Image (cartoon, helix red, strand yellow):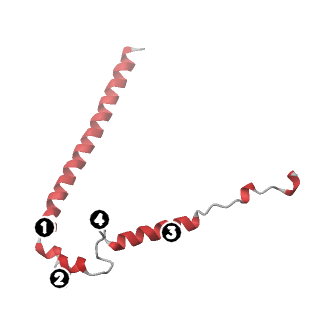
Amino acid sequence: MNIEALDYALVTAGVGMGIVFFALITLSLMMLLIRSVFADRAASPQSAGDSAGNSAADVTSEPGPNSLDAGGVPRWALAGAVAYLLAEESQMTPYASPWRRRNDEA
């Protein structure tokens, strides 16, 4: 192998990996910044309740779409997942028409 070609391949690979690592580090720092900005809002007492001023315990204790199941998942999320799976299953029902014998193959 030509030494210039090997040098070019190594430099190209190094620059490519450098760009990827730089992008990943930049995205990681951006996520840390976003997390620190929005962590203050999530910890504020006003965001713990709904817009009517109810506390989070009052909102989650109601038997409605905002109540939580045993795993801490809102019931509206479970209902949406079930509806999606049922719709997907109704569209993808198996049928046996490709396996039917044709009249001319007998």
Q: Nearer the viewer, mark 3 or mark 4?
A: 4
Q: Is disc 4 in contact with disc 1, using a CB cutoff of under 8 Å?
A: no
Of callouts 2 and 3, the N-terminal one = 2
Badge 3 element? helix
Inter-mark Cα distance, 2 to 3: 35 Å
* First in sequence: mark 4 vs mark 1: 1
Which residue is label 4 attached to? 71
SS class of the residue under badge 2? loop
Please state which of the two labelled residues, at mark 4 or mark 2, is closer to the viewer: 4
Q: Position of residue 10 (x, y in %)?
A: 33, 24
The relative height of residue 95 versus residue 46 in the rendered view (above or below) is: above
Is the C-beta separation of discs 2 and 1 under 8 Å?
no
- Which amino acid lies under the numbered mark 4 shown in the image of this protein? Gly
Q: Position of residue 80 (x, y in %)?
A: 41, 71
Side (left or right) of 89 relative to 44: right
**Residue visible at 29% across and 65% down?**
71
Gap in angstroms between the C-alphas marked 4 and 1:
22 Å
Question: Which is more toward the observer, 6 or 92?
Answer: 92
- Is residue 84 positioned above or below 57 on the image? above
Q: Residues within 10 Å of mark 4 (few under 14, many from 20)?
A: few
Alpha-carbon distance for marks 3 and 4? Answer: 22 Å
At x 52% / y 65%, what residue is drawn? 88
- Spatial CA distance of label 3 from label 1 is 37 Å
Residue holding disc 1: 43
Quadrant of image for the N terminus: top left
Question: Of the residues shown, which amino acid type is indicated by label 2?
Answer: Asn
Residue on which the image places disc 3:
86
